[in-house]
Image (cartoon, rainbow, N blue to C red):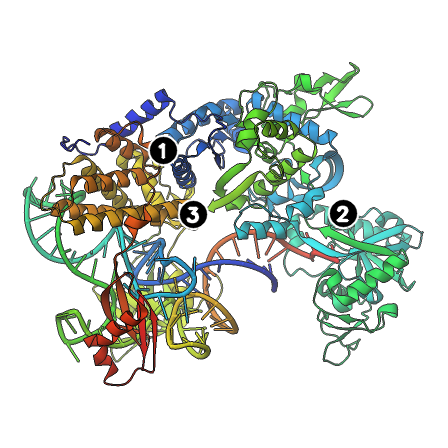
Amino acid sequence: MATNLLWMKYGHGAIEQKWRERWEADGLYRARVDWDRPKHYALTMLPYPSGELHMGHWYAVAPSDARARYMRMKGYNVLFPMGFDAFGLPAENAAIQRNIHPPTWTYANIDRMRGQFKSMGTMFDWEREAVSCDPSYYRWSQWFFKRLVEGGLAYRGEAVVNWSPSLQTVLANEQVIDGKDERTGQPVVQKMMAQWFFALTRYAEELLSFDGIDWPDPVRLMQTNWIGRSEGAEVAFTTEHGDRLEVFTTRPDTLWGATFMVLAPEHPLVASLTTDDQRVAVTAYQETTARRSEIERMEADREKTGVFTGGYAINPVNDERIPVWIADYVLPTYGSGAIMAVPAHDGRDFEFARQFDLPVFPVIHPAGEEPLVEPGMAESYVGPGVMVNSGPITGVETNLEKGRKNPSVAAAIDWLEERSLGREAVNYRVRDWLISRQRYWGSPIPMVFTESGEVEPVPDDALPVLLPDDVDFQKATGNPLNWHDGFLQTVDSEGEPARRETDTLDTFMCSSWYQLRYLSPDDELEPFDPEEAAYWLPVDVYTGGAEHATMHLLYTRFFTKALRDIGLYDATAEAMRSHGRDPDGLFDEPMLMYRSQGQILGEERDGDFVVVDGERVEGHVVASSVRVEVGAGPADGLVVGEIVRRTENVLQVRAGDETVTVEIPGSATVDIPSISGTNDVNQLKHHLEIQRMSKSRGNVIDPDDLVAQYGADTVRTYLMFAYEWQKGGPWDSRGIVGARRFLDDVWKLGTSAYEPDAVTDEAVAALRRLVHQTRAKVDRDMESFKWNTAVAALMSLRNELQTVQKGRAVDEAAWSEAVDTLLLLLAPIAPFITEEIWQLRGGEGSVHVQPWPEADPDVAKDESVTMVVQVNGKVRDRIEVGAGITETEAIELALASERVQGFLEGGEPKKVIARPPKLVNIVV
RNA sequence: GCGGGUGUAGCCGAAUUGGUAUAGGCGCCAGAUUUAGGAUCUGGUGGGUUCGUCCCAUUGGGGGUUCGAGUCCCUCCACCCGCACCA
C-alpha cells in the first residue's frame, strides 16, 4: 500500500457527502436473494414519522446498522430494511390544529427523516422501503384482516371497552396506563360497544412459550405476566330463578367457605336477580359505575363499595343459599365477570364482608396454629394448612402451590368433575385484541353494513378501501369519515345500498406484519413474495425499545402464528422446500433474536446545592438539618455547597474552595423537594436531575447539529461508546469530543506516512499480538451487542499505534496489518471515515465488502504473562513468566520472590494454591 | 401490594463468569503552542498516605461461604422498570 500520502485535515462534511452519493450510485446496499450465500435478516423497529430523527432514533438505529454491517463483513447476505409506521394520531392533530392534510404532513416528514437516516450512514436498502399509510401497503393490511375474519380469528363483538373521551376513540387494553390514555394522560372510561377484535386469547397458551427464540428475560417475563395464566376451576352456581351462574376460581377447594357472590355491575344476570325493593339501589350503582372512570375505579385503597341485589344463588357443593351482590371490584372482563366470595381466605372478599357485615366462614385450619375463630378474625388467611368444614375434602392438606399441585385444589376439582358441578379450567388475564379505532388516519376496516343489518366484507378486488382525501376536520371532533357521504355510501354484494364501516385499524396491526412487506414492497399481487420470504424469513435479529414488550412485540408474535394457522405461509414453505430449506418451525415466531436498547435521557444538570445547619465539631460538621436547594442561588446556612460524595451518613460538601465533611445523625431532618414524602440521608446522592429529553424541558439535543459539527461517524461512535446499550443513560455533551479525537487520530494514523527504523522481532510480535487480540475482542463484542467495549478496544489499539508510530520499531507489513485491522474493525461503526481512508490507502473496492479480519489464535497468544503472587489472598508481587509455566515452577518462582519472603517473615507456608500462569496464593 | 432489575472514581463505564478491581473515555491538574480564547500536543491524576518502584483501605451498608468475592449466599438501604381489586 502507498505510504506517501499527502496529509490532510479530517473534513467530515465533504467525506460523508461524497460517500453517501457514491454508495447510492453504486447500489452498495442493495440486498438480493442469493441461495448460494447464508442470509441474515436484521430488522430494527420502524419509526413513526413525527418529523425529525431525535437522539433516541440514532441510539437505536446506529448500533443496529453497525451490527448489520458487521454481519455483512462476516460473510452473510444481509437484509436491513427501513420504513415508516405512518398512520396515527399526530397527523390528525396537525390536520386539526394547522389545517394540513394528514398525508401531506406525513409524507413531508417521511422525506425529511429518510434524508436524516441517509446522513446517519445507514446501510438500508431504500428500494425496499415500506410505508404503512401507502394504499399499496394498507391494501394488504385490509387483505390480512379479511383473511383473519375468514379464519375465525377476527370478529365483531359487543364488549366493555376503554373509551377515551379526549381522543374520541376506543383503545386497546395495552394502551391504557393507570386508567389513563397513554398518549394524552387523560382518563379513560368503560363503555359497552360493538367493536372488531382479533382472537389473541386463543393463542395465550402458545404465546407463553418462548421455545426456539432468544429474547431477553425481562421481556419474556413481562409478556408472561401480561398474559397472566391462572389455573383453577369453573363452577356452576344456580340462581333462584334457575339461571346458570358460572364463576371462575383458582381456589375451588374453598367452595365450602363461600358465603356470598359478587357480580360485576355490568353482568347480564343482574337484572333478573334484582328484587323490586333493591332495584332502585342497584340501578343507581350501575349508573355510578358506568360514569366512573377507570382511574377512579382503580384508586389504590378505595373502600369497597357494592349493593345487594336482593337475589340469591345456590352453592352447588352444599346447596347453601347465599346472597348475590354487585360491586365494581369484580371486573366484567375477567373470567365470567362473577365470583364466589370466600371472605375467610381472600383479602378482597374479607374487606367486602366486613364493609357490609356479611358472614365469614373459615375452611382452612392454618398449619401449626390454632383454628381460625369467627367472629374475631382480623384478616383473611391465605396460607397453608388443612381443609376443615369442607364436606368431602375435609382433612385434605392445602399448600401454597397453584392449581393441581395443591392437593386440596386437586381434590376439589376431582370431586366437582365427578358430579359435573364444575371442571378444571385455565383463565388468562389477557383479553382479545381490540383493533377498531374511531379515527380517520388509519387503514379503513374493509367491511360494509347492509340495509338489513348484516356485516359483509368488501371483495378482494375492491381493495384497498381508500381513505378519502377531502375530509373536513374542522366540522366536528371525532372521526370525519362519519359524515363523509362519498365514503359512507356504498353497495353490498347484491348491489343494494350499504354503509361502510368507518372504524380504522389499530396501527399496531399495520406494524404486526411490516417485516413481510419489506420482502417485496412493490408487489401488487400478494402481500409478500413467497420466493423472497423463503430465503429471508424469519427475522434473525430484531432491535428496538423494550417499551413495546406487551404491545407490538406480543401482537407481532400473535400475528405470525395466526398467519401460519390460516395457511398464509404455505406457498413460502413450498418455495423453501424447492430450494432445499426445511420450513419446519420457521413460521412459529417472527423474530428469532430480540435485543432492546435503553433510553437516552436529557443532560444531567449540576448537582443541586445543599444547605446544612448544625454545629462544627472537631473539624467536621454535625448536621441538624439538610435541605436541597434547587439551583445555586444564595442561601443562608452553616455549610452551603454541592455534594461531592456520600458514604452512609457522611457527606463531603464542596463549599467554595474547601470540602467540608458533614455528618448527618438520625436526628437531623432531610428535605429534598424533588423527592416527595419523608426524605432520608440515603436519598441525598441521587438528587441530580436527569430527565427525558423533551421540547417542553428545553433539553433536546438535535442530532443534525452534532452531525454538522462533528460528523455522523463521530455521533455513531460516541453513542456506541458512551453507554451500556441495554441501559442507556443521560446525554453528556462534553463526552462527544473524545469520540471525535479518536477519529481524528484514526485519520492521522491512516493517512500519514510510516517509515520503519531499527525494526525488532519483539516489537513486531508484540504489535501483531495486540492486533489479533483486538480482532478477537471486537468480534466477540460486536457479536454480543457490547459496542462500548468494542470501541474501547479500538481506542486502545489507537493508543498503541501512536506509540509504535513514534518508535518505528515494526516493519512495514506489521504496521499495515495493524492499520488495516483498525479500519476494518471500525468500518461498521464509522462507515464514512473508514471508507475514505481505505480508498486513500489504495484498498481494493469498498471497505464495507471486505471480509471481517479474523483473529489468528496463534498470533494472539501471549508468550509471557504477569503472574500474581498473593500472600493470604493479598497481592504482594507480580512476576513475568512464560505462558507454559508448570505448577511446580510457578510455586518455586513465587516462593523465591524477595518481596514475598518479606511478607512470609520466615513462616512456613501452610498451603499454596497455584493457578499457573496467572496466580499463586501462599497461605501462612 | 406483587414481579423484575440496578448500585464500581467527580461523571459514563470495564473486569474473558470465583483469581492483578477501576480497561477505555469524559473531566480535572501542570506544561507547551497561541495576542487571547478555543482547538491541538506532552505529562500527570484517580480515596487516604510519612508521596515511595512502599503500605493501608475500597465495588450502596452489614454479615457469611472460600486459600481467594465486584462476582456466590443471607440481610438491610436506595434507585429504576413492569403490573396493580385478575377472583
- Quarter holding the N terminus of chain A is top left
Question: In which quadrant of the rendered view does residue B28 lie?
Answer: bottom left
Give the amino acid type for the residue marked by disc 2 in the picture. Glu
For disc 1, the marked residue is A120
Above or below, A813 relative to A360: above
In space, the residues marked 3 and 1 are separated at their CA atoms by 22 Å
Q: Residues within 10 Å of mark 2 (few under 14, many from 20)?
A: few
In space, the residues marked 2 and 1 are separated at their CA atoms by 56 Å
Front residue (pair A311, A724): A724
Label 1: which secondary element: loop
In space, the residues marked 2 and 3 are separated at their CA atoms by 56 Å
Instruction: Please state which of the two labelled residues, at mark 2 or mark 1, is closer to the viewer.
Output: 1
For disc 2, the marked residue is A287
Instruction: Please state which of the two labelled residues, at mark 3 or mark 1, is closer to the viewer.
Output: 3
Image coords of residue A646 (percent x, y): 34, 67
Q: First in sequence: mark 2 or mark 1?
A: 1
Is residue A2 visible in the rendered image? The answer is: yes
Q: Which chain carries label 2?
A: A
Q: Mark 3 lies on which chain?
A: A
Q: Which residue is drawn at 55% across and 49% down?
A: A219
